[in-house]
Image (cartoon, rainbow, N blue to C red):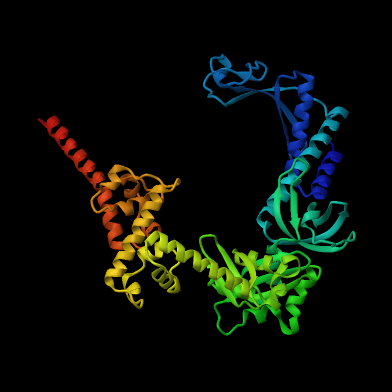
Amino acid sequence: MTKEIFQAIEGASLEKGVSKEVIFDAMESALASATKRRYDEDAEFRVAIDRETGDYETFRVWTVVDVEQLEEPLNPAAELTPEDPRAAGLEIGDTIESPVESVAFGRIAAQTAKQVIVQKVREAERARVFEEYTPKVGQLVGGAVKRVGRDNVIVDLGNNAEGLLTRERLIPRETFRIGERVRAMLVELRPENRGPQLMLSRTSPEMLAELFKIEVPEISEDIIQIRGAARDPGSRAKIAVSTNDGRIDPVGACVGMRGSRVQAVSGELAGERIDIVPWNDNPAQLTINAMAPAEVAYIQIDEDAHTMNIAVAEDKLAQAIGKGGQNVRLASDLTGWTLNIMTEQEAADLQEAEAVRMVEEFMESLSVDENVATVLVEEGFTTLEEVAYVAEEEMNAIEGFDEEIVEELKNRARDALLTRAIASEEAREPAEDLLNMAGMERELAYRLAGHEILTMEDLAELAVGELLEMIDDLGEERAAELIMTARAPWFEEAESGAQDESVEGGGTGA
């Protein structure tokens, strides 16, 4: 091993940023490959290079294997069975070695070493990039544009790492020149054969939030929180912000003096217009905030369908919807609700039609006249469940209703719900043990069945909180009683088992 080779190893280590040990390992692999070609292609060899002198030794290697575990026939040139005399005292997986004459580090060995070194260096580079950038997924990274193609932009991130910006993750109509600095979100890291693909994005809502963290110190210090973000990349965006510090205006802090902070973020995103709205835990109020600059006149919420009907003045309809539906779409993305925009008149017509439908449903399901059904709707009742399970005091307060009327209405509502559950194709039939369980009502059993609680065993496995989530009008005390009743067979089995063990123990001692 010559001085020139040591210099080559040193140079490759510095140039490629990999340790000399990796390159020495590559040299050893190359010499082992050359040795295989000289002696026996089926044999295995190990080469050990002295890191100080460059001298090296070569050993032929046999591995002790379990023949039954082999997927291919035994290779006598490199494998031994435990029965082989040479394997005496060794275990499966152990090796024995025998020194052989080393091959000279000639032209062929040098060529092989070069190929192996290149491969090892590439593997080391891929591993280094993967290790360096894995913790950075979900963060902003920056680099210089290296290459611009028809469908993507390659960004040089430094240290032999390249990021890929595909066309769909570029802001529309955005162009770059080679050498131009660019920032983007690292959204994905794909391990590829040719090296890890660092997938970048300039269109993700997370990038908007990260840019505000840079421009607004209160966000990076966690005084202000970004609670949601929605983008139409390059055109418009909305973010919702909040703070626990009552002395700070979160919206004003994000806008900055004369709009300096929001303008800095907008400039990074090709002039994207950004609406900053205050966060609110009430979905309706958050939606009102998110619809800005349009003013909301009325909201109707359907929690089951997770939708809201939003009424605005007729002359504000176009503003509320936005160009191409942009404003309502961004507000929907920000709030997580499906938003239906309509005029106040359309909302009134829809509300009137819904009231008529509910009146008709109450008349049919409760067998009451139009006057009683209308009173229920006017008092805010919208479903049979509300009539059946709302507090009696609340219904007694309705003018013209007394305890007898309220009790009759609640009983009819429960009967109607039970009939509906039984008739429904999706309804599940509760088991006999649940129907006949002490303290269980038939109507309650069918309600439980609607939540896939079909047997006493199913009920016994619930916690009180889980049962109350399913049947919220049950009450904590009754929920606990029902669960303990359902668990009674468990305790009986445990006591029976203990008695059996006691009897067996007594028999042994006799």
Q: Is residue 441 left or right of residue 62?
A: left
Q: Residue at x 16, y 37 (%)?
A: 502
Up-down relation of residue 403 to residue 190 (above or below): below
Q: Residue at x 87, y 40 (%)?
A: 4
Which quadrant does the N terminus fall into?
top right
Residue 222, can we see it? no
Q: Residue at x 60, y 63 (%)?
A: 336
Residue 127 in the image: state x and y as whole percent: 71, 46
Which quadrant does the C terminus fall into?
top left
Q: Is residue 145 left or right of residue 24?
A: right
Residue 343, by quadrant, is bottom right
The front one of 389 and 178 is 389
Residue 236, by quadrant, is bottom right
Residue 68 in the image: state x and y as whole percent: 55, 18
Residue 298, can we see it? yes
The front one of 215 and 23 is 215
Residue 387 in the image: state x and y as whole percent: 38, 65
Q: Residue at x 66, y 71 (%)?
A: 239
Residue 326 in the image: state x and y as whole percent: 72, 67
Up-down relation of residue 410 to residue 429 (above or below): below
Q: Which residue is situated farthest in the left direction here?
A: 510
Number of marks present in the image shown: 0
Residue 314, by quadrant, is bottom right
The front one of 424 and 279 is 424
